[in-house]
Amino acid sequence: VRNSEILFVKDNTDNRGAMAIICLHGTDISNILFENINVGPCGYLTTLFYTESIFDIPGNLALPGEIHDVTFRNITQSGGENSKLIRLSGWSESKKLRNITYDNVMVEDQKINEKYPRTANRYIENIIYK
């Protein structure tokens, strides 16, 4: 996804975000790039996670697959009380979030880094901030 404007995201629940990747069936999701995107008010800025069901759709995480090699590059976000939120949730030791890069991601004129607040669990590996 490149060169985009996200005007707003009305819902602020933790399973939705301006830029979201949700793994429902153990699908392999990799080599994803979000680049040159301006984001207005939103619930979560980014959310990446595995789930057994979403929107009343059941999934099957017994199937192989994982989320890895995802890059957010040149992202700017402004406005909105909760728009700074980031969720990173792997499923298990065999279904981690791996190699997630935040490269020049600015939230209200501040570049995010490893100290940036986020909701995360123990099944994440190699989160990179540039």
Image (cartoon, grey):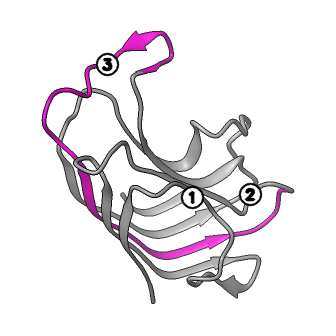
Where does residue 100 sit, x and y in percent of width and height? 36, 68
Residue 83: mark: 2
Q: Secondary structure at mark 3?
A: loop
Residue furthest toward the right?
A: 81
Looking at the image, is 53 positioned above or below residue 108? above
Amino acid type of the residue tagged 2 in the rendering: Ser
> Tag 2: Cα neighbours inside 10 Å, few (<14), some, or many (≥20)?
many
Residue 17: mark: none
Where does residue 68 sit, x and y in percent of width and height? 25, 59
Residue 5: mark: 1
**Sooner in the amino-acid sequence: mark 2 or mark 1:** 1
Foreground tag (2 vs 1): 2
Residues in magenta, as a range: 53-80
Where does residue 98 sit, x and y in percent of width and height? 29, 64
Dividing the picture into quadrants, the one containing residue 92 is: top left
**Sooner in the amino-acid sequence: mark 3 or mark 1:** 1
Residue 59: mark: 3
